Image (tube, coloured by chain):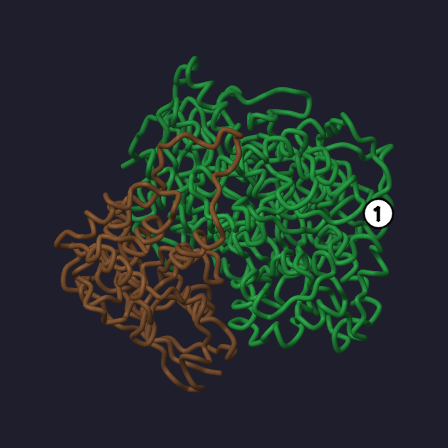
Chain colours: A brown, B green
Amino acid sequence: MKITLKIKRFNPETDRKPHWESYEVEVEPTDRVLDALHEVKWYQDGTLALRRSCAHGICGSDAMRINGRNALACKLLMKDVAKDGGTVTVEPLLGLPLLKDLIVDMEPFFAHYRSVMPFLVNDEPLPEDGRERRQSPEARERFDKGTWCILCAACTTSCPSFWATDQYVGPAAIVQAHRFIFDDRDRAAEARLKVLNEQMGVWRCRTAFNCTEACPREIPVTQLIGEVKKALATGKLE
Amino acid sequence: MTQYHQFEAVIVGAGGAGLMAALHASKAANVAVISKLYPTRSHTGTAQGGIAAALANMEEDHWEWHMFDTIKGGDYLVDQDSAEILARDAIDSIIELEHMGLPFDRTPDGRIEQRRFGGHTAEYGQRPVMRACKSADRTGHMILQTLYQSCIKQKVTFFDEYFMVDLIVQDGICRGVVAVHMDSGELHVFHAKAVLLAAGGFGRMFKVTSNAHSLTGDPVAACYRRGLPLEDMEFFQFHPTGMYKLGILLSEAARGEGGVFLNDQGERFMERYAPTMKDLASRDVCSRCMYLEVKAGRGIGGKDYLYLDIRPESITRYQSAPGGKPVTAEELEKKLPDIIEMMRVYQGVDPIKEPVPIQPTAHYAMGGIPTDNDGWARADEKGGMVAGLYSAGECACVSVHGANRLGTNSLVDLVVFGRRGGKAMAEFCKTATFAPLPKAPEAEVAAELERIRINTGQEKAGKIRVEMQNSMMDNVSVFRTGPMVQTALDKVRELKERFQRVQIDDKGQRFNTDLLETFELGCLLDLAEVTAAAALDRTESRGAHSRDDYPKRDDANWLKHSFAFHTGAPGAALTSPAIDLKYRPVVITKFEPKERKY
């Protein structure tokens, strides 16, 4: 099918602000949006800049705004975003500084990630038999959903509270905190909850559900944020 | 303006091997990790099914069995001292990952749960064994996340989106690397006492591949261009269960949980080829059998693909799950969530209800930068070493995978040899001094990048890339013959000549991915040339290297590793086809080579 890709372009070396450019491409209905972007980059206009790597929804490089919604370009098929003869709009993620075309500065996103201590803290002695710490399947299941996160930033950059202030720690960082707060091997839940109880923490969430809709890994982000809020409100980890 | 940095240890690549090396090296040395991707984008994250270790959490198992399986899986081209380290250290390494926080699946008594995988057996080949530790079918993702988390905890210094373009090596001493800062386009020289290359594979030389777009082997090509050898490049693994046409990987775990191959007649054809291991024979064997089925006209609808069947009723009927037990759709969805979703998204097929079209996909480079058991890079086939240069992970060749890697052993390799390499480089840094940099160490690669940027020739990189990928897929994949490989070699050499006339569109500095992708293509062309040249020279069939014109393994003449050298001027690999192939004997310790049957 033939479609028009309308891409928001910005070259920091020549442009003062972004502008739209359109490209006509021939695609299969089952092609990924990423395939269509490659069609442009490899055969029409090599100046188009984007990030991508694995091309099947795991590495998290190619989160962008497609038809006004955040998604991974490699996980959306053309038949799901356009009809034959139709137009697909592609823009960089909102809320992060624009560097070039579809590439934004990810550093503020990763700074929020780092702020919640996204690593296991447990200084207790390791098992004497030299083996793994024991964890029941139920305890493992408790924090499973948060472990699916690929740090693509689709959630955080779809969040109205994050658009309002980029100081807000954002849904992805809260998901990462949740992953450790509810891991029964971890001992730093209190320190993480303290960070998330601050002004730019979890209370900035207004339960808009944009994050849950944007997540390409189908993590119930809003629910996980709610569990962190509940832990703060009740002082209990359940 | 070129910028200069000095770190005792520089690690290139931030996947499993690079991060593991960084964690261990940074305990004793001043370390920088540079990567052309954000670390969490690395291809380790796409590994699915598991990481093997003889923990014996499910049933009896021993590291000696794992060692044997690794050697047999590699068709006896494995260095057996290295395989022993792999199988022994695997146990400790996995415990170390758990202690770092890796969320492994658990048994009812809280231990790490394990599953079956291709080529992993009990009692030296008697029956499949549950050895693969896992986190559903996202094991690589969990390893990558956990290692990155640990690096943040340990405050490792990262240079994200710095693209290594050259290795600084002079008089047999490695002195650092040259990288492009992708955002600004500026060149950065990293002066180091020791460099560890851990930048993954280069499957993008083939048309159908499970590999990420970024897997183009740039640091491997840099070594080659600087006169260092590449080992066993003729051995490239084709994974049997790639999604038809797309090449996206469907984990061997699908068969570990009971999935089977079917041909057009609905026959479970692996029973004929591998009566003991059946669908869990090693990957090279399964891919060859698929090719033979297609050749015999038993591809689906007479076409070039087959089916992978994981329907619960099929698994129950074939009694192909562990213990021959029945399975339910819910159990499969829990054990294989990601690949089931991928089949639904990318192929529009619900694997719970229908079989899935599959074909072999270029998956893993057994070859690469030759190293000893501490990741230290070899300078030649005779025992010479490169002072200050290390490598680990897929871009290295220890060799623990020989002629064919077993499933799960890549993740084992990453953590075991990443750790050993990181420790060894830190130890080296304690006594080593900074070898002086040559004058303008960036000059040669800067000239090559500028040549690409301003070239006004009429060739397009995209077209050359496709022609290379097609020729390598048609002629140097699951089955090869001398004339086929020669065709590919001639084609790659023609493309290298045309590459000199590629014109790019983006003449700018910042995030010039047009320029860098073209540079990557140049690296792939060099590595494709070496792969074809080594495949042409090896007149036998062993592991992933199957020569239709030499169908037998020939231990008398070929029980040896190839070492390919570029013999032209330094950096001139792109224009000169001068390849010198030398050989190094395989290390045999415990297991004499014998015929390989599954």
Closer-to-camera residue (B392/A118): A118
- Residue located at (63% from left, 49% from top): B493
Image side of residue B571 versus residue B290, left or right: left
- Residue located at (41% from left, 32% from top): B23
Residue B270 vertical position relative to residue B27 in the rendered view, above or below? below
Closer-to-camera residue (B93/B426): B93
Percent of width and height locating residue B37: 40, 48
Percent of width and height locating residue A124: 37, 32
Closer-to-camera residue (B330/B31): B330
- Residue located at (67% from left, 54% from top): B238
Closer-to-camera residue (B122/B225): B122
Percent of width and height locating residue A31: 50, 73
Identity, as a three-letter code, of the amino acid under mark 1: Lys
Percent of width and height locating residue A234: 21, 57
Crowdedness of circle 1 by 10 Å Cα count: few (<14), some, many (20+)? some
Q: Which residue is mark 1?
A: B597
Chain bearing mark 1: B
Where, quadrant-wise, is the N terminus of chain B in this rendering?
top left
Residue A171 shows up from this direction: yes
Residue B503 shows up from this direction: no
Helix, strand or loop under label 1: loop
Image side of residue B239 versus residue B124, left or right: left
Quadrant for residue A175, please give it.
bottom left
Farthest residue toward the left?
A199
